[in-house]
Amino acid sequence: MLKSAAFAESKYCDYGSPLGLTPKGLLPFYPAGDRGPIYTEPSGQPQGGNFMPFIHAKLTTTPTPEEMEAIKTDLGKAITKIPGKSETWLMVQLQGGCALWHQGKAFEKIAMVEVQVYGTPSDESCNALTGEITKILENRLGYPPEHVYVSYQFCTQWGWNGSNF
C-alpha cells in the first residue's frame, strides 16, 4: 500500500521526519511536538547523529510500484545498521530510468546510492549499511554487487519544520 500522497502521485518519493540517536555522553531534552528526544552536549547544544537519514537511489532500470515499496521497506530495516536510525524517520527517493555510465560504459543494471545522515556514524555501521543496500538491490532487482555504488554525506546542518537542528 502506498503511504503518502506524494509517493502515490510521483511513484518515486516517500517521506519521513527526524529521529534521534542516543550518543554516549549526550543529554536528552524533549522539544515541543512529537519528534522524540534531541540529545545535547552539557552546554545544551544539539549534537550529531540525531535526525532523519535520507537515501536516494539512482537506478538504470525502472522498478514497479510494488518493487519500490519493497525496496523502501527493506531500506527501512537496513538503516538500523546505523545506531539510532529507523524506518520511522527515514526518507527514501527511488529514481528509476537513470542514464548512468561508469568507466565510459553504459550498463543495463547499475546504481548510485547516496546516503545522507545528520552526524557522523562509525565506519563499521556505514560498511554494514553498504552491504545491506547492495543485497537489497541484488535480491529485489538483480543488480550485480559490483554495479552498486554507495556514497555517504555527513551533515552538521539539517533543517526541518522551518529551522535547523
Image (tube, helix red, strand yellow):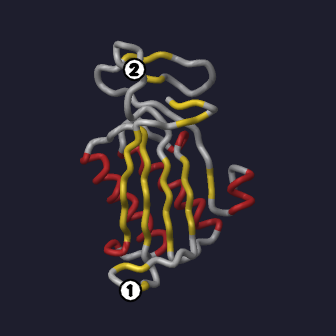
Q: Are marks 1 and 2 in contact (CB under 8 Å)?
A: no
Image vertical order of residue 107 relative to residue 18, above or below: below
What is the tally of numbered marks visible in this picture? 2
Q: Residues within 10 Å of mark 2 (few under 14, many from 20)?
A: some
Amino acid identity at mark 2:
Thr
Closer to the camera in the image, 82 or 161? 161
Where disc 2 sits, the SS reads: strand
Which mark is first along the chain, 2 or 1? 2
On the question of residue 1 being in view, the answer is: no
**Left or right of 23 in this view: 85:** right
Measured from the top left, where is residue 121 in percent x and y? 32, 41
The Cα atoms of the two marked residues, 1 and 2, are separated by: 47 Å
Amino acid identity at mark 1:
Lys
Where disc 1 sits, the SS reads: strand
Q: Residues within 10 Å of mark 1 (few under 14, many from 20)?
A: few
Image vertical order of residue 118 relative to residue 96, above or below: above
Image vertical order of residue 88 relative to residue 37, above or below: below
Dot label at residue 81: none
Q: Measuring 63% from the left and 71% from the top, which residue is drawn there?
A: 64
**Left or right of 121 in this view: 17:** right
Determine which residue is flagged by label 2.
Answer: 40
**Residue 130's quadrant in the figure?**
bottom left
**Residue 65's quadrant in the figure?**
bottom right
Q: Measuring 43% from the left and 67% from the top, which residue is drawn there?
A: 112
Closer to the camera in the image, 76 or 42? 42
Determine which residue is flagged by label 1.
Answer: 105
Measured from the top left, where is residue 29 in percent x and y? 47, 16
Measured from the top left, where is residue 43 in percent x and y? 36, 13
User: The N terminus lies in which quarter of the figure?
Assistant: bottom right
Closer to the camera in the image, 43 or 112? 43
Q: Measuring 49% from the left and 73% from the top, which residue is drawn there?
A: 141
